[in-house]
Image (spheres, rainbow, N blue to C red):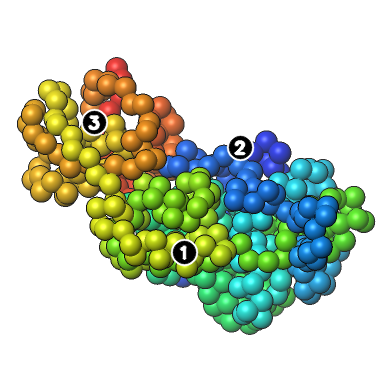
Amino acid sequence: MLKAIPIVLSSLIILSGCQSTGGLAGSTPLVSSLSQHSSYPHSPTLPRKLPWTSDARIQLDDDSEETPPEDLWARIRSELSWDDVDNKQVQLAVDQYVAQPSYLPDVSERGSLYLYYIVEEVQKRNMPMEIALIPLVESTLDPFAYSPGQAAGLWQIMPSTGEHLGLHQNWWFDGRRAVRDSTEVALDYLEQLHKEFDNDWLLALAAYNAGQGRVARARKDNEDKGLPTDYWSLDLPSETRRYIPKVLALSQIIAEPESHAVEIPPIADEPVFEVARVDGQVDLARAAELADVSLESLRELNPGQLRWATAPDGPQELLVPLGTGERFEAGLAQLTPAEKVRWRNYRVRPGDNLISIAKKFHTNAGLIRRVNNINGSSIKAGASLMIPSSDWTSNLAIAEQPQPPTIGYQVRAGDSLSKIAGKYKVSVEDLVAWNSLDPGQYLKPGQTLKLHVAGG
């Protein structure tokens, strides 16, 4: 069964999607709709604007003669094609959205960065525009959203399914949070489900939420009983039965906001970012300088980047503000490898260990070990280590603290990194570093984790 978990965004409590436990081929869900925001590494505070412009929405100086760009919501509105569904579930979802007047303005604020790209990709594939509303339900258009069920990103993709669909997920990068990567695989998967379920989009959305195996079994049960096999007739989990009405309700509200007394602030119907090629590793602070934006702005465009730099292996890409890509690539080409990634020399002190040093400099113990050709975990006082350093991390004032004692924790059914971190008042990033984990990987019951907890 699926289990709904309340989200922590107070203004959106009744509007979020729900955690799924169905899945691809009947075992693993593609998505687990946003249940709460975790303390995932380096998640900016929301809502956000386009930081490199005066306003995220349409705004021109009074004396400007430039024609304002069209409103993206108006474009979405003109492309909505599904018939209104008049039933209690959809009306309940409409009433819930209308009762939260800040919901669509907040989503519009976040959507200024990402929604145009999603709409473009949906239209390129000739998919119904209603599909572009799925991330509103899944994550409230927050690519940094990370659920207790380990789903992440705009489309709330589960780790195992992301891997199955070819998304890169490692210590450096999580493709489930990357805007372009996650949108591509989510739309690929929805098209696959649409074909599998006889070109029925409601069944495809139900399978996206509950898992295709769960929906297929429900259809088979109805067929065996001589019952209809449309979405509304199937015996599906309660969370999935609320999921599709939310999408339909949003479609109705966006189609006629005035009749629902809802204000939707306009978003410029124009691209926001472009793709820049990156060969090899580059410090994100240095990349932000080249793109002439703040580090925070660059991170908002590249939520899949988990660390202070891109991964050592290339080539790869970064999203940069529209119009800056050529200058960015030209500036990057002029940098030496030493200028792209800054390192610092650190002399080991008595009492130091790799984990404590990694924590001081916001990096990973395994990375320090690999860079310095260290076998095992022992280091000697007085030895010199090369530590990756960036403007973003080295400016932090980090106090010297004794390393807390190590304890062992045996993973139980239902545990997640965020749940364990919250229980012991440590960060998810520390758990990942202490145990050489990937941030999005599943934990297995019986697995033993090392924790450094004050007081044992």
Residue beneath disc 2: 8
Q: CA distance from mark 1 to mark 2?
A: 40 Å
Depth check, front residue: 72 or 246: 72
Check disc 2: other Cα within 10 Å, few if <14, some if 14-19, many if 20+.
some
Q: Residue at x 86, y 57 (%)?
A: 257
Q: Is residue 143 left or right of residue 435?
A: right
Question: Of tags 3 and 2, which is closer to the observer?
Answer: 3
- Say which quarter of the image contains residue 14: top right
The residue type indicated by label 2 comes to Val
- Badge 1 or badge 2: first in the primary sequence: 2
Check disc 3: other Cα within 10 Å, few if <14, some if 14-19, many if 20+.
some
- Say which quarter of the image contains residue 240: bottom right
Residue 290 to residue 128: above or below: above
Q: Is residue 30 visible?
A: no
Q: Is residue 264 left or right of residue 54?
A: right
Question: Of tags 1 and 3, which is closer to the observer?
Answer: 1
Residue beneath disc 1: 327
Q: Residue at x 36, y 26 (%)?
A: 397
The residue type indicated by label 1 comes to Arg
Depth check, front residue: 448 or 142: 142
Location of residue 51 in the rendering, given as x and y in whole percent from the top left corner: 60, 48
Residue 390 to residue 189: above or below: above
Q: Is residue 365 left or right of residue 242?
A: left
The residue type indicated by label 3 comes to Ser
Location of residue 167 in the rendering, given as x and y in whole percent from the top left corner: 41, 65
Q: Is residue 426 visible?
A: yes
Residue beneath disc 3: 356
Residue 306 to residue 77: above or below: above
Q: Residue at x 34, y 65 (%)?
A: 333
Q: Residue at x 24, y 31 (%)?
A: 356
Helix, strand or loop status at disc 2: loop
Question: Of tags 1 and 2, which is closer to the observer?
Answer: 1
